[in-house]
Image (tube, helix red, strand yellow):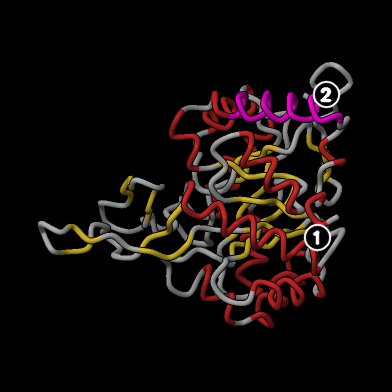
Amino acid sequence: MPASGGGIDLSTSLAGLRLRNPVVIASGVLGVSIGLMKRAEDNGAAAVTTKTTTLEAREGHPNPVIVELRYGLLNSMGLPNPGAAEMGRILRRAKEILEIPVIASIGASSPSEALRVAELLSTADAFELNASCPHVRGLGIDLMADPGLLAEMVSALKSLGRPVFVKLSAHGDALQVASRVLGAGADGLVAINTLKGMAIDVWARKPVLGGIYGGLSGPAIHPVAVRVVYELYEEFPGVPIVGVGGVERWEDAVELVLAGASAVGVASALRRGFEVLSEILRGLAEYLRCEGFRSVGDLVGLAHS
């Protein structure tokens, strides 16, 4: 869907990836199902991001792993995945079926490990280094405390000649980490991941989640995502940013674009069905038309002017 009638152009670009519109499926929600990836594409998604893949398979945390709250979702999946070798086979099949780009999310704790995972996922169109998962020790958010290590991991991934994005957390100094990874060659940033939280069953008087701590997603984190994207764009103008966090309606997507995102990730909203993607795109196109804009690019960072 490069345009949406009436001269409205929804296409965008992310570090050389041409997207038919700015709506990307964020990591973690499609599992390993190529059928779900195809449904996302058929409903308008411009790219899909895989679940975070580690070198060896992971079972994840014990049940329960997700709880719905009044203001969003809390999950403690524990990065379950089939391992890089099997995910590589899944990606090769997916690339035969999908016409949209596939971004491979990588979970690793060292440059050599990140490179090995990426080599096994080499059919992906781009890599997303997960530096922000809030509920798995040694992976994700722990890396935010070591920007130098993250920079080394980015350098290793860049050797494969694919665009490299780094997914940041709102926990820690996102601007400092962004500066280091961009200096190491990262092509773009993804912000934000879920926020670390927990829920306690007041009757059982115990944590609800099997992993105790979880990642909060949905509407509750949207204002935080807007703030982080705004700060990143202000500090690093021109760097491609994928804004993620609580995108439930087209207004949420527009808000992130105005803050500085060139694309937006959708995750928790898919619990309402893949039709939410079409709803967001229709609303975005109508907003552009009514407000006198011809393209999504005209909106990027406009809240800063």
Q: On residue 3, which mark appears?
A: 2
Magenta stretch encompasses residue 131: no
Residue 21: give its label.
Answer: none
Q: Main secondary structure of the magenta part?
A: helix
Asked whether residue 303 is in view, the answer is yes
Residue at image coords 63%, 30%: 280
Please tell me which residue lies in front, 255 or 92.
255
Q: Quadrant of the C terminus?
A: bottom right
Q: Amino acid at mark 2?
A: Ala
Question: In front: 259, or 32?
Answer: 259
**Residue denoted by label 1:** 187
Q: Is residue 37 above or below residue 186?
A: above
- The magenta stretch spans which residues? 277-292
Up-down: is 203 above or below 172? Answer: above
Say which element carries label 1.
Answer: loop
Image quadrant in which the N terminus is located: top right
